[in-house]
Image (cartoon, rainbow, N blue to C red):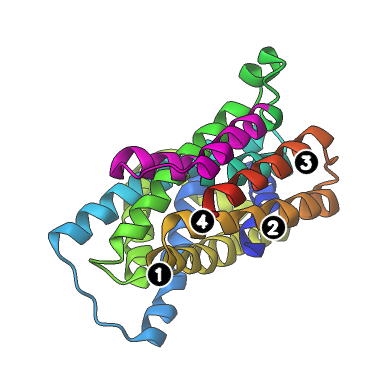
Amino acid sequence: MFFWGTGWSALKILTENISMDVIIFWRFLLMSLTFLPILYFFKEPIRLNFSAIKFILASSVLNIAFMMSSFYGVKYGLAGAGSVIITSLSPLMTFLLTLILFKHKVSKTQAFGILLGIIGGVIILNLDSPRLFFDGSNIYFLLCALIWAGVSVLSQHSGVHIHPIHYSFFISLIATIFSFFYAYSANFSIVFEQDSRFWTALIYLAVFAQTIGTTIFFMASSKFGSEKTSSFMFLVPIFALFSAWLILNEAIQLYIIVGGVVSILAVYFINKH
């Protein structure tokens, strides 16, 4: 959660001069290369079947979509605000998604949690001012939350068919291949003209925020379930807001903090038995 939180400031730095297509390609490429020593260390035999491939392809598409939405959200908005919106709403959307797909029964406590989540979402998305919502970056962050809910559900059920380490590696590898064709036409070699600040942000984002952080998340999802694992995402805004304030000089907005706290309470009641 620390790697994910501080990764938002790194992403903000990357959006300053480079196009989205190029950033996504290099991010996935570095992720794939970083996985090689991890695969060697774990020495788990790779087993691929049709079900595993379906999960990998679906997750690759969703991961690319998530990165596209987060890129534009951070480019036109605040890194700290984006982290709060996504991590506050994603667990709620994950719960609702599993509710719809697997027809779980909802207790009164969970229903109350859902209501709190809606209230928290209204606050952090600033829906009292529709113009600010639709003209700003919030719609990208909202889409990110929805996409990540799908990623969480897929990662939970993929554990039956493939080891989480292999799952993460093949997602990044497939996404690298897909994104290469867009990056090639967008002058993907422009990254070699960038300064050390850019490369520090890119390496940190790809290696720590993506390879290490996401692999830990997938391993936890397959072991504990997507609902419980997603609730840990509420630690992300704490690190994201602080790092954005420290690195990017972003102001911490009160309505986002209030909405985030309400959403945290929502997930507490949803997970309470």
- Mark number, residue 257: 3
Residue drawn at (65%, 30%), measured in percent from left and top? 119
Left/right of residue 164 with respect to residue 272 in the rendered view:
left
Q: Which residue is mark 4?
A: 273
Residue drawn at (24%, 82%), measured in percent from left and top? 45
Could you tell me residue 261's position as x and y percent?
A: 73, 44
Nearer to us: label 1 or label 4: 4
> Mark 3: which amino acid?
Ile
Could you tell me residue 270's position as x and y percent?
A: 53, 47
Left/right of residue 79 with respect to residue 90 in the rendered view:
right
Instruction: Kindly report the distance in space between the C-alpha atoms of the residues bearing marks 1 and 2.
Output: 25 Å
Region of the chain picked out in magenta, as a range? 93-122
Write down the quadrant of residue 77 in the picture. top right
Q: Which residue is mark 2?
A: 6
- Mark number, residue 223: 1
> Mark 1: which amino acid?
Lys
Q: Nearer the viewer, residue 44 or 34?
A: 44
Nearer to us: label 2 or label 4: 4
Reading the chain from its start, which is encountered first: label 3 or label 1?
1
Q: Secondary structure at mark 4?
A: loop
Write down the quadrant of residue 109 in the picture. top right
Instruction: Kindly report the distance in space between the C-alpha atoms of the residues bearing marks 3 and 2.
Output: 17 Å
* Above or below 53: residue 107: above
Instruction: Kindly report the distance in space between the C-alpha atoms of the residues bearing marks 1 and 4.
Output: 19 Å
Left/right of residue 192 with respect to residue 243 in the rendered view:
left
> Mark 2: which amino acid?
Thr
> Mark 4: which amino acid?
His
